[in-house]
Amino acid sequence: MTNKIILAGFGGQGIILSGLLLAQAALLEGNEVTHYPAYGAEMRGGTCNCSVVISDKEISSPIVNKPDILLLFNQPSKNKFEAKCIPGAKVLINNSLINEQALRNDISSFYIDATNTANKLGNIKIANMIMLGALSKITGIVKLDSLINAMPEILSARNKKLIDLNVQALKEGYGLF
Amino acid sequence: MTNKIILAGFGGQGIILSGLLLAQAALLEGNEVTHYPAYGAEMRGGTCNCSVVISDKEISSPIVNKPDILLLFNQPSKNKFEAKCIPGAKVLINNSLINEQALRNDISSFYIDATNTANKLGNIKIANMIMLGALSKITGIVKLDSLINAMPEILSARNKKLIDLNVQALKEGYGLF
Amino acid sequence: MITGKILYKRPKTLKDVNMSYCPGCSHSLMNKILCEIIDEFDIQKKTVVIAPVGCAVLLYDYIDCDSVEAAHGRAPAIATGIKRVNPDNIVISYQGDGDLLSIGMAETIHTANRGENITVVFMNNAVYGMTGGQMAPTTLVGQITKTTPSGRNPENEGYPIRACELINTLEAPYFIARCKVTNSKSIMQTKKILKKAIGYQINKKGYSFIEILSNCPTNWGMKPKDSNKWIQEVMSKYYPVKIFRDKGEA
Amino acid sequence: MITGKILYKRPKTLKDVNMSYCPGCSHSLMNKILCEIIDEFDIQKKTVVIAPVGCAVLLYDYIDCDSVEAAHGRAPAIATGIKRVNPDNIVISYQGDGDLLSIGMAETIHTANRGENITVVFMNNAVYGMTGGQMAPTTLVGQITKTTPSGRNPENEGYPIRACELINTLEAPYFIARCKVTNSKSIMQTKKILKKAIGYQINKKGYSFIEILSNCPTNWGMKPKDSNKWIQEVMSKYYPVKIFRDKGEA
Amino acid sequence: MNKKILMKGNEALAEAAIRAGCRYYFGYPITPQNEVPAYMSKRLPEVNGVFVQAESELASINMIFGAGACGARCMTSSSSPGISLMQEGISYISGAETPAVIVNMMRGGPGLGNIAPSQGDYFQAVKGGGHGDYKIIVFAPASAQEIVNFTVLAFDLTIKYRIPVMILGDGLLGQMTEPVVLPEMKEIQDDINWSICRGQDQVIIRSLYLVPENQLELHNLHLQKKYRSIEKDLNKYYEQYNANDCDYLIFAYGTTARVCKAAIDRLQKENIKIGLFRPISLWPFPKEEIISISSKIKKAFVFEMAQAQFEEDIRLSFEGKKEIKGFYKLGGAIFNDDEIYELIKKNI
Amino acid sequence: MNKKILMKGNEALAEAAIRAGCRYYFGYPITPQNEVPAYMSKRLPEVNGVFVQAESELASINMIFGAGACGARCMTSSSSPGISLMQEGISYISGAETPAVIVNMMRGGPGLGNIAPSQGDYFQAVKGGGHGDYKIIVFAPASAQEIVNFTVLAFDLTIKYRIPVMILGDGLLGQMTEPVVLPEMKEIQDDINWSICRGQDQVIIRSLYLVPENQLELHNLHLQKKYRSIEKDLNKYYEQYNANDCDYLIFAYGTTARVCKAAIDRLQKENIKIGLFRPISLWPFPKEEIISISSKIKKAFVFEMAQAQFEEDIRLSFEGKKEIKGFYKLGGAIFNDDEIYELIKKNI
Amino acid sequence: MNKKNNPVINTDKCKGCELCVSECPVEIIAISDEINIMGYHPAYITDSTKCTGCIKCAISCPDAVITVYREE
Amino acid sequence: MNKKNNPVINTDKCKGCELCVSECPVEIIAISDEINIMGYHPAYITDSTKCTGCIKCAISCPDAVITVYREE
Ligand SMILES: Cc1ncc(C[n+]2csc(CCOP(=O)(O)OP(=O)(O)O)c2C)c(N)n1
Ligand SMILES: Cc1ncc(C[n+]2csc(CCOP(=O)(O)OP(=O)(O)O)c2C)c(N)n1
Ligand code: SF4
Ligand code: SF4
Ligand code: SF4
Ligand code: SF4
Ligand code: SF4
Ligand code: SF4
Ligand SMILES: [Mg+2]
Ligand SMILES: [Mg+2]
């Protein structure tokens, strides 16, 4: 079983980080994983996305051109990626920032009020964790526990103090569905 | 008919210049010519030599490894080149600076007191012209007149004032044989 | 529609597009100022801006003038090539500190030394912006960057280089100044100085070097306002804002 | 056989071979002086001389120390690599004006700026010796060279660069001096200064830059004596002989 | 066994270098390999190593020339434009025979191009972008784990043969995060009695040999002899994927080869007998093996993110014996498995 | 017809450049091509041209990038190590498509090597020593007269195709003096409406195309299309010497080819049917012609002053159809006709 | 002297850098809670009637998204 | 104080640059008419008895071909 996931949004929304957390969690569960950021122009701003592949066997291509799971954090990402996913794909949409109209009817769209929920939790930056929590619940691709266990590996050198907040956000997202 | 000539001596003895004058004279007589200096290390001092090829047809290789005519201006050159020339070669030796002992008996050696003669004419630097004058007489490879006519082309930008002196030296060398 | 006399509007030479610089970045500001000056001299059609390798690499997407995109550090050499062919065009070499003072040090000094009649706009933001915040030659002692994780240590990395002072040892340059753009007042002063420099070029006076103490809110990890405050309070202590040489006034 | 007390003899570190420099060339002299100093400090086995690309490229054929032959202009970078690996070795970067100030400008300034604990011996002979006498960055105004056939014209070629003055704008260097070697007296003074510089290196004080006003009789088209006279009378007017900085004395 | 951890290709490379005994890093920032200097600047001081951010790639390559002259395990890294600037230095280091590990995480060219993955520097790496006759060992890993393994090997080989060793990756390999197992920290005992700073008789590290016939020619013949023996020693670095009993064989390396595997899996399900031959060392090139395998197939395909560069070496091995069809992606564009699948289907 | 005058290769080249309309020269001294800048520094001011001695080869190549961006006929010259330093710049100029004539009078390598004639930079010139996929036109003249002719052509082609054109000579060709006939001074009327400084709408000279798929890939495809059309246009630059009805054919270029001719003359006197095929343009390589001639001979010989660089292109053309035997001189050593004669005798 | 001034911020293109905010001598520029299409919180004019037309905001706006008009 | 000094020039290796000549305070160094094996006119000592042992000649000889001895 191989899952091909794309996470996409603005720079600054923690897209890359959440992709890494997802990969780490999947690794903890014994999977093969790859994570590849579309690092784009050598500059700030603009859109930002990354591909995560999770599989039970060796992963040949780390590039995802037709995702089966999509996490969309802002409107431009939806415009760009919705059309690319395979029929039957699961599409998680941060509808704090994205209008709800799905353009395709052969996919399953899930709406998560991630940014607003994050705001309520006191930090707009943890919208990414809300999304991941929801992902765990919706797809079962990784367990919530794995995400939580993966946290220290990924945040270690960075904002360790924020781990608790992030875990809370994961749970919140998980609880939304 | 192709002649392969090497002129060799110290840096500063006007070796390259006399090679060029010889080539120019031969060109004036309607020959094909090449002149190739062994420019050696990117520095002053040491030995210095050049190859001149004169032919009535297109010249393929400008490099002379077995000369049929040799002009030797100092002892190290003699040591280096005498062994390389073909049997029957004509070897002109500046015996102001070179001891007279020929190492081979299958070549024709000609001794020219060039440096001393030049000194007498008032300029040690025109020993090269004495040698060329002698060359003209001994080998007939170029006419004395051609050498004289070639002079302005070669010396033009340099020491035009010295042309007369150089011509005198050519004649002097020519007259030695 | 709003009407009335326009007190300030976007300069004509600045294209009507979003500049991809980060919010509050001095690059945006200086691109704008350059365009204002080009408009005021009415030299849009004869100006050539050399885009550096650095955050300003897409300069030509914002400034509507002929442009050549240089290799990293070589903008002054390219400017030399252009100016020698077309002495009547106005050539502006716009460069960051990594570009101008690190990899391009030799070209910077030799172009200044030849006194090429060009204008160099030097955006000193004490960091490599485009590549994500590594140490620049102008990074201050103690400043933390991606490649000086414990702060710049002069024992290992040496001291920040003062470009104006360096260039001021050369004979040929005509005009050398260091400016800042931390508020509207200093922006106005800077504009005056840069305009003077370009005026000198128009009048074939020779080489000008205008250093701008610039911010990089993103890589400094500061809000734009704080970054300008840091320039004011820290950076300009080490890099004094002043006119180093003005042969036109001498 | 001659016997007696030896008042002066060829230094031990100078190999018993003919140096292929031209008669009277300052390179020969400075190779010799370096060897004298190396002998006096007894550091032959721990000294590394970096040979430049220039007339001194065969340095290691004359000076009997470990040596690396650099690419043109890159001697200071190589010296940095060596010194960072072996801080206890004595590393001397010996370079001509083309090498050090033209193609190697960036490496020269940045190595000085990092304050690498090395000694740079800068042979300023106002010309490219090895390649047959082209203009150097230090060629004087009006000086005729192979590539300035009507004399160096500042309008086209800029002004001669003063290396010590340039490097003196940097914080890190420990010792900066310009010397000449035009007669026995100035040779002695120069030796004293260079010895001080190497002493500083031995004591881990940091970077020294010692410029030597040098001749190139061959490409200047002068007799050695006249070339030294020209240094005395013309060259040292533009390039003042002095100690620019000595942190050891400060 | 050490534990599998997630690491970005660039960081895995940096850590592997340190575990392979690298204590001297000189480099200049450039995307997509900035994680290497960033990592080194933090990590090297912890192991008493030296990190210097050079003023340019010219300085970097010459700093490792100096460090290498001391027999040190040293490294620099960059990406395409920066590697171009190192060509003179690489030629010097080759001539002077000092150790050096050079990393090129290739990006789209020519010129400034972009920062997307590319394989456009194949010729430069393998044929020699600098002047004169020299060769460098070139490894093209295809995963973070291979980056680790071949970085370690690179240091051993550069010391053993005194030849520059290049790790030729690309933006994707540098930026991708994958699980890796890191080796233990290596104890170094290098035989470097040819190097400077050992307090012995004079050692000269040089590449100038003024007299052609009896100096530089001999030196070159010595280098060529060394190259021939390296070719003999290092002929086993390639991977075959379903390559036995194939009608069709794909030749690809690095990132491209990975994507090809995905396409091969699909094609095999349709009973198309197709496999992959992936050289890992690009110089020495596994020519013998390719010659022998070429006789067993009907047709070969080459995929590369460059215009028929790698393909030339395949052609030189095939010598016209079988048909070769090449497909190229240029300017930082990457093949995806669907495309490869389609292209193969159309061309068999 | 103009009169035959004696000129050194380097000076003939410089004068030919001026007569071809070159008014901008930027360069840095290096043996064995120092006569080029020396000549230019004197001659250019006489024709209102500009001579700038750059601070380095890096500066030179970027100065001609700037001058070329203005559509100017401009030139730089150097020798092997200096050309290595230009590789980044050549890649940029290729990407930005500006005109540039670049002279490389090759010397012995690798590294500082020596200043004797060599052909060791063949790969660098022909395969691309810089990063990314690009090609430059490379001419390899074999006499002072050809230096003149191909320098003139180089300027026309660099303007026509906006591609760097390299004159690839060597120390011998640069230093040798031969008779040449110089062309008249050319009147220039170049169509340069793509260039900057024309007071029109914005012109951008760039090589950055950030988005791979719809920018840099397209740009590369455009470049490749241009290269294919140049290959079609320039397929006639080669010389055949006694090449009809041969059993054996020597492949060689430049200086080496000249020496081969002397050997061929001797061998033919002994009724050995041997000839010479000499490519003059090394890229585009006269591949079609070589393929067709390869079918008519028994065996081929390659002579070059390098280690099997040029030979690779011959092999790529032959595709194994006939035996090829290569002979190499390295490090600035030159073949002489006796040697070639002996080698052929021993190997037929 | 009592002509009305009108500072106009192009909200779509404002990057919310706040540099104009502190420049305004009459403190009539504030940052919005809304997010614009670029994802930034743009600046807006709280009370244009107080504007003195000093153009300090416009001068200091890096992205040149402020235009200042004076009623004629 | 009346010890004899002995300046010795290695004539084979002297390049005839003449730099020692003008250094000698007692003017006892001259240039020979002969040519040595390197092709140069070497310096020689005209009257070593006058030598003061000041070693100025040796210091200024670029090629280090002068040795100065003092009788013991
Ligand atoms: C030869 C080369 N080396 C390195 C780079 C990578 N690079 C791009 S921009 C940059 C530095 C930019 O810093 P700076 O010049 O200070 O400009 P800023 O982005 O700060 O304005 C570097 C190192 C490159 N493109 N080319
Ligand atoms: C990259 C490169 N460019 C140019 C040269 C040619 N070159 C050799 S020495 C030299 C200049 C030497 O001048 P300088 O450094 O002043 O030393 P000098 O010979 O005067 O002592 C040059 C340009 C080279 N070897 N390598
Ligand atoms: S990274 Fe820094 S310099 Fe670059 S655009 Fe952003 S703020 Fe400006
Ligand atoms: S050319 Fe000049 S610098 Fe070089 S050795 Fe001769 S005199 Fe000395
Ligand atoms: S013009 Fe002046 S007063 Fe008006 S909004 Fe701008 S800064 Fe405030
Ligand atoms: S300065 Fe300009 S970009 Fe910044 S907040 Fe104000 S209007 Fe917006
Ligand atoms: S030691 Fe002094 S006195 Fe004696 S020869 Fe030398 S310079 Fe003259
Ligand atoms: S200084 Fe030395 S080399 Fe020169 S003439 Fe005197 S002894 Fe000879
Ligand atoms: Mg910067
Ligand atoms: Mg010099």
Image: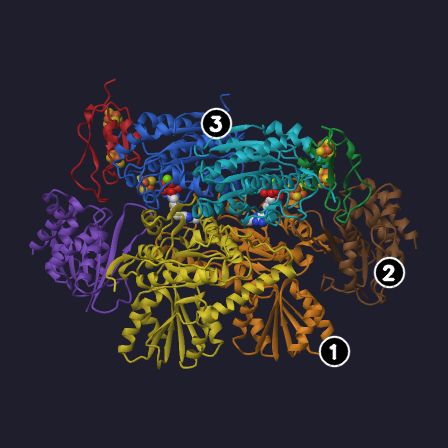
Chain colours: A purple, B brown, C blue, D cyan, E yellow, F orange, G red, H green
Report how far apart the C-alphas of labels 3 and 1 lie in the structure: 82 Å
Few, some or many residues within 10 Å of mark 2 (<14, 14–19, 20+): some
- Left or right placement of residue C8 versus residue D182 in this view: left
Ligand 8 appears in which quadrant? Answer: top right
Mark 1: which secondary structure? loop
- The chain identifier of the residue carrying mark 3 reads D
Q: Position of residue D108 (x, y in %)?
A: 50, 40
In which quarter of the view is residue A37 placed?
Answer: bottom left
Q: Amino acid at mark 3?
A: Glu
Label 2 in the same subunit as label 1: no
Q: Residue furthest top?
A: G1
Q: Position of residue F329 (x, y in %)?
A: 62, 65
In which quarter of the view is residue G55 placed?
Answer: top left
Q: Position of residue E177 (x, y in %)?
A: 27, 58
Please report contact status of discs 2 and 1: CB closer than 8 Å, yes or no: no
Q: Which residue is mark 3?
A: D249
Residue F270, label in figure: 1
Q: Which residue is mark 2?
A: B109
Few, some or many residues within 10 Å of mark 1 (<14, 14–19, 20+): few
Mark 2: which secondary structure? strand
Q: Is residue F105 above or below residue E326?
A: above
